[in-house]
Amino acid sequence: MSQTRPKPWKWPNDAKIAIAITVAWEGWSPGVTQARGDVFGEKELGRVMPLKTALGLGMKVQGNSDYPCSPMNPFLHLRSAVARQTRAGNILDPREAITVDEAHHLMTTGAAYAGFEEYKRGTLELGKLADLIVLSEDPYEVPPESLECIHVDKTIVGGEIVFERTA
């Protein structure tokens, strides 16, 4: 179920039936944020992507890029979830911010669950696929508002280097 401005009062039932919420956390571009503000009102913008509420209710949530409608930069999405900051710099209800760990979970374990592949990917376990990336910076050490500046330096798939960033 894809929801931008969901109705949290319906979620407790959704959690019981194991529906996965798909979050296209595009970094809330100025144009999108302004358009939603015009339609819903500034106060309602805080309800956009209530990730902390969803996780607190035990919902299965996965993050995606919604590409090509939004940029394919997972670190922009990470910043959106952790800092709750639009690209224009506005903060949307900071009570709905999640941690880097929680956002990482949505992009890995949550995505595997939503794709019905949690048995073979999404966590590092014996017998599962273990593709990995090497990052330019540690997301746990970068200020939340700068997370989008992280780059992938190397990608390893099936034990082979398939991408290496040049300086």
Image (cartoon, helix red, strand yellow):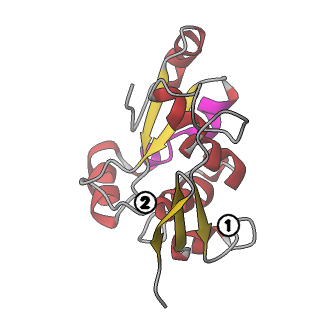
Which labelled disc corresponds to residue 27?
Answer: 2
Of callouts 2 and 1, the N-terminal one: 2
Q: Tell me: 80 left or right of 33.
A: right
Please give the name of the residue rendered at 49% of the width and 91% of the height, measured from the top-left corner: 167
SS under mark 2: loop
Say how many tags the image has.
Answer: 2
Q: On the rendered image, what quadrant is the N terminus found in?
A: top left
Residue 124, horizontal then vertical, whole percent: 70, 42
**Res. 48 visible in picture:** no
Q: Is residue 82 above or below residue 124?
A: below
SS under mark 1: loop
What type of secondary structure mainly makes up the magenta span? helix
Q: Tell me: 85 left or right of 39.
A: right
Residue in the foreground of this view, choosing between 140 and 126:
126
How packed mark 2 is, by other alpha carbons closer than 10 Å (few <14, some 14-19, many 20 or more), is: many
Please give the name of the residue rendered at 47% of the width and 23% of the height, measured from the top-left corner: 116
For the residues labelled 2 and 1, the Cα–Cα distance comes to: 17 Å
Give the residue pinned by disc 1: 139
> Splitting the image into 4 quarters, where does residue 134 fall?
bottom right
Tell me the kind of residue under disc 1.
Pro
Tell me the kind of residue under disc 2.
Gly
Give the residues drawn in magenta, as a range.
43-55
Residue 81, horizontal then vertical, whole percent: 56, 52
Residue 149, horizontal then vertical, whole percent: 53, 77
